[in-house]
Image (cartoon, helix red, strand yellow):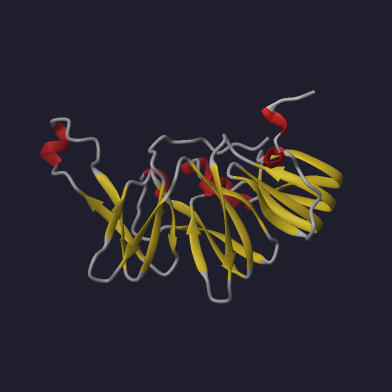
Amino acid sequence: MKSDLFASENLAQAAVAPGMSLQNAKSVRYNVNGEMLARQGAMVAFRGNLQFERKGQGIGGMLKRAVTGEGLALMSVRGQGEAWFAHQAGNCFIIDFEPGDALTVNGRNVLCFDPTLSYEIKMVKGAGMTGGGLFNSVFTGTGKLAVVCDGHPVIIPVTSQSPVFVDTDAVVGWSARLETGLHRSQSVGSMIRGGSGEAVQLKLSGEGFVIVRPSEVTETVTGH
Protein backbone atom coordinates (compact mmCIF):
# COMPACT_ATOMS: atom_id res chain seq x y z
CA MET A 1 0.00 0.00 0.00
CA LYS A 2 1.45 3.36 -1.04
CA SER A 3 0.43 6.87 -0.03
CA ASP A 4 1.85 10.14 1.27
CA LEU A 5 -0.14 9.23 4.38
CA PHE A 6 2.67 6.82 5.26
CA ALA A 7 5.46 9.39 5.02
CA SER A 8 8.17 8.91 7.64
CA GLU A 9 7.18 12.06 9.52
CA ASN A 10 3.73 10.55 10.16
CA LEU A 11 4.98 7.23 11.54
CA ALA A 12 5.22 6.71 15.32
CA GLN A 13 8.75 5.58 16.09
CA ALA A 14 9.78 3.69 19.21
CA ALA A 15 10.51 6.03 22.11
CA VAL A 16 14.17 6.30 23.08
CA ALA A 17 13.76 8.06 26.44
CA PRO A 18 11.07 8.33 29.13
CA GLY A 19 8.90 11.43 29.32
CA MET A 20 7.22 13.67 26.77
CA SER A 21 8.20 14.76 23.30
CA LEU A 22 6.44 16.27 20.31
CA GLN A 23 5.09 13.62 17.94
CA ASN A 24 4.35 16.44 15.51
CA ALA A 25 3.02 20.00 15.68
CA LYS A 26 -0.45 18.75 16.66
CA SER A 27 0.25 15.98 19.18
CA VAL A 28 2.48 15.01 22.11
CA ARG A 29 3.84 11.55 22.85
CA TYR A 30 4.57 10.52 26.43
CA ASN A 31 6.71 7.48 27.19
CA VAL A 32 5.25 6.51 30.56
CA ASN A 33 7.41 4.72 33.11
CA GLY A 34 5.49 5.15 36.34
CA GLU A 35 3.00 8.00 36.32
CA MET A 36 2.09 11.21 34.49
CA LEU A 37 -0.90 13.57 34.43
CA ALA A 38 -3.08 14.73 31.55
CA ARG A 39 -6.23 16.68 30.88
CA GLN A 40 -9.26 14.41 30.81
CA GLY A 41 -10.25 13.49 27.26
CA ALA A 42 -6.88 14.47 25.75
CA MET A 43 -5.57 10.92 25.14
CA VAL A 44 -5.99 9.89 21.48
CA ALA A 45 -4.02 6.61 21.46
CA PHE A 46 -1.81 4.41 23.63
CA ARG A 47 0.07 1.15 23.64
CA GLY A 48 1.52 -0.90 26.47
CA ASN A 49 0.29 -1.58 29.98
CA LEU A 50 -1.31 1.70 31.04
CA GLN A 51 -4.16 2.50 33.42
CA PHE A 52 -6.15 5.75 33.23
CA GLU A 53 -7.84 7.13 36.33
CA ARG A 54 -9.94 10.27 36.70
CA LYS A 55 -8.34 12.65 39.17
CA GLY A 56 -10.81 14.76 41.15
CA GLN A 57 -10.37 18.43 41.94
CA GLY A 58 -12.09 18.27 45.31
CA ILE A 59 -15.22 20.19 46.28
CA GLY A 60 -13.57 23.58 45.84
CA GLY A 61 -12.19 22.68 42.44
CA MET A 62 -15.53 21.36 41.19
CA LEU A 63 -17.25 24.54 42.39
CA LYS A 64 -14.73 26.68 40.54
CA ARG A 65 -15.23 24.65 37.39
CA ALA A 66 -19.02 24.94 37.68
CA VAL A 67 -18.78 28.72 38.04
CA THR A 68 -16.25 29.37 35.27
CA GLY A 69 -16.27 26.30 33.01
CA GLU A 70 -12.49 26.50 33.08
CA GLY A 71 -11.28 24.21 35.82
CA LEU A 72 -8.54 21.67 35.16
CA ALA A 73 -10.14 18.21 35.08
CA LEU A 74 -7.24 15.74 35.15
CA MET A 75 -6.53 12.05 34.81
CA SER A 76 -3.49 10.13 36.01
CA VAL A 77 -1.81 7.68 33.65
CA ARG A 78 0.11 4.86 35.33
CA GLY A 79 2.13 1.91 34.16
CA GLN A 80 4.56 1.33 31.32
CA GLY A 81 3.87 2.22 27.72
CA GLU A 82 3.30 5.13 25.38
CA ALA A 83 0.37 7.51 25.11
CA TRP A 84 -0.45 10.24 22.59
CA PHE A 85 -2.27 13.43 23.52
CA ALA A 86 -3.94 16.12 21.39
CA HIS A 87 -6.94 18.46 21.44
CA GLN A 88 -8.97 19.52 18.40
CA ALA A 89 -5.86 19.63 16.16
CA GLY A 90 -4.47 22.57 18.14
CA ASN A 91 -0.76 23.40 18.02
CA CYS A 92 1.21 21.74 20.82
CA PHE A 93 4.17 23.17 22.71
CA ILE A 94 6.37 21.72 25.46
CA ILE A 95 7.53 24.03 28.26
CA ASP A 96 10.53 22.92 30.33
CA PHE A 97 10.35 24.29 33.88
CA GLU A 98 13.53 25.04 35.78
CA PRO A 99 13.80 25.75 39.55
CA GLY A 100 12.04 29.02 40.38
CA ASP A 101 9.86 29.08 37.25
CA ALA A 102 6.14 29.72 37.70
CA LEU A 103 3.53 29.96 34.96
CA THR A 104 -0.20 30.67 35.13
CA VAL A 105 -2.07 28.70 32.44
CA ASN A 106 -5.70 28.64 31.42
CA GLY A 107 -7.10 25.16 32.14
CA ARG A 108 -8.39 24.77 28.57
CA ASN A 109 -4.82 25.02 27.26
CA VAL A 110 -3.26 22.33 29.48
CA LEU A 111 -2.58 19.03 27.68
CA CYS A 112 -0.32 16.91 29.93
CA PHE A 113 2.58 17.28 32.34
CA ASP A 114 5.19 15.53 34.45
CA PRO A 115 4.19 14.50 37.98
CA THR A 116 7.21 16.43 39.31
CA LEU A 117 5.39 19.68 38.54
CA SER A 118 3.11 21.18 41.17
CA TYR A 119 -0.17 22.78 40.15
CA GLU A 120 -2.83 24.73 41.99
CA ILE A 121 -6.09 26.22 40.76
CA LYS A 122 -6.14 29.82 41.94
CA MET A 123 -8.41 32.80 41.58
CA VAL A 124 -6.90 35.45 39.34
CA LYS A 125 -6.49 38.47 41.58
CA GLY A 126 -8.54 41.45 40.53
CA ALA A 127 -10.32 39.54 37.75
CA GLY A 128 -13.73 39.35 39.44
CA MET A 129 -16.53 37.27 37.92
CA THR A 130 -15.71 37.63 34.26
CA GLY A 131 -14.90 35.47 31.25
CA GLY A 132 -12.11 32.90 31.30
CA GLY A 133 -9.86 34.77 33.68
CA LEU A 134 -11.42 33.93 37.03
CA PHE A 135 -9.66 30.65 37.90
CA ASN A 136 -6.43 29.52 36.28
CA SER A 137 -3.83 26.86 37.08
CA VAL A 138 -0.45 27.90 38.46
CA PHE A 139 2.42 25.51 37.68
CA THR A 140 5.70 25.45 39.61
CA GLY A 141 8.60 23.08 40.20
CA THR A 142 10.76 21.24 37.69
CA GLY A 143 9.60 19.16 34.75
CA LYS A 144 7.74 19.51 31.47
CA LEU A 145 4.28 20.85 30.67
CA ALA A 146 2.58 20.43 27.28
CA VAL A 147 0.12 23.13 26.27
CA VAL A 148 -2.19 23.36 23.27
CA CYS A 149 -3.17 26.52 21.44
CA ASP A 150 -5.57 27.38 18.62
CA GLY A 151 -3.33 28.70 15.86
CA HIS A 152 0.11 30.22 16.41
CA PRO A 153 0.40 31.98 19.78
CA VAL A 154 1.65 35.51 20.26
CA ILE A 155 4.15 36.06 23.10
CA ILE A 156 3.95 39.65 24.32
CA PRO A 157 6.59 41.02 26.74
CA VAL A 158 5.21 42.85 29.77
CA THR A 159 7.27 45.56 31.46
CA SER A 160 6.65 47.84 34.42
CA GLN A 161 6.47 50.77 31.99
CA SER A 162 4.17 49.00 29.53
CA PRO A 163 1.29 46.87 30.91
CA VAL A 164 -0.56 44.62 28.47
CA PHE A 165 -4.34 44.27 28.15
CA VAL A 166 -5.64 40.90 26.95
CA ASP A 167 -9.08 39.59 26.04
CA THR A 168 -9.99 36.99 28.67
CA ASP A 169 -11.16 34.58 25.94
CA ALA A 170 -7.82 34.81 24.12
CA VAL A 171 -5.30 34.53 26.97
CA VAL A 172 -3.40 31.24 27.23
CA GLY A 173 -1.11 32.02 30.15
CA TRP A 174 1.33 34.46 31.70
CA SER A 175 4.28 34.77 34.05
CA ALA A 176 2.89 33.97 37.49
CA ARG A 177 4.68 36.94 39.07
CA LEU A 178 2.72 39.48 37.02
CA GLU A 179 0.06 41.58 38.71
CA THR A 180 -3.45 41.13 37.36
CA GLY A 181 -6.56 43.28 37.28
CA LEU A 182 -9.48 44.30 35.09
CA HIS A 183 -9.51 47.14 32.60
CA ARG A 184 -12.69 48.59 31.17
CA SER A 185 -12.03 50.03 27.72
CA GLN A 186 -15.56 51.35 27.16
CA SER A 187 -17.68 53.84 29.01
CA VAL A 188 -20.99 52.67 30.43
CA GLY A 189 -22.80 54.83 27.87
CA SER A 190 -20.89 53.20 25.04
CA MET A 191 -21.80 49.73 26.31
CA ILE A 192 -25.48 50.66 26.49
CA ARG A 193 -25.34 51.84 22.89
CA GLY A 194 -23.77 48.59 21.73
CA GLY A 195 -20.08 49.42 21.94
CA SER A 196 -17.27 47.54 20.24
CA GLY A 197 -17.77 44.17 21.93
CA GLU A 198 -14.41 44.54 23.71
CA ALA A 199 -15.62 46.05 26.98
CA VAL A 200 -13.34 44.41 29.58
CA GLN A 201 -9.79 43.05 29.38
CA LEU A 202 -7.38 41.38 31.75
CA LYS A 203 -4.64 43.85 32.70
CA LEU A 204 -1.15 42.42 33.27
CA SER A 205 1.60 44.56 34.75
CA GLY A 206 5.10 44.03 36.10
CA GLU A 207 7.96 42.13 34.45
CA GLY A 208 7.31 39.02 32.38
CA PHE A 209 5.29 37.87 29.38
CA VAL A 210 1.79 36.86 28.33
CA ILE A 211 0.79 34.16 25.84
CA VAL A 212 -2.18 34.98 23.61
CA ARG A 213 -3.94 32.79 21.07
CA PRO A 214 -5.22 34.29 17.79
CA SER A 215 -8.80 33.28 18.59
CA GLU A 216 -11.56 34.33 20.94
CA VAL A 217 -13.66 31.22 20.43
CA THR A 218 -14.61 29.88 23.84
CA GLU A 219 -14.35 26.18 24.62
CA THR A 220 -16.08 24.06 27.20
CA VAL A 221 -13.67 21.87 29.17
CA THR A 222 -15.11 18.39 29.42
CA GLY A 223 -13.87 15.08 30.70
CA HIS A 224 -14.33 11.80 28.88
Mark yes or no: residue 71 visible.
Answer: no
Location of the C terminus (image quadrant): top right
In terms of depth relative to the viewer, which is nearer, 40 or 130? 40
Q: Residue at x 73, y 32 (%)?
A: 6
Please tell me whether residue 95 is drawn above or below residue 98 in the rendered image. Answer: above
Q: Residue at x 47, y 52 (%)?
A: 135
Mark yes or no: residue 151 visible.
Answer: yes
Whole-percent x and y of residue 176?
Answer: 45, 66
Q: Residue at x 32, y 65 (%)?
A: 158
Q: Is residue 15 left or right of residue 133?
A: right
- Farthest-out residue, front: 2
Give the image quarter of residue 152. Answer: top left
Please tell me whether residue 42 is drawn above or below residue 33 in the rendered image. Answer: above
- Farthest-out residue, bottom: 99
Whole-percent x and y of residue 20?
Answer: 69, 56
Location of the N terminus (image quadrant): top right
Give the image quarter of residue 180. Answer: bottom left
Whole-percent x and y of residue 156?
Answer: 35, 58
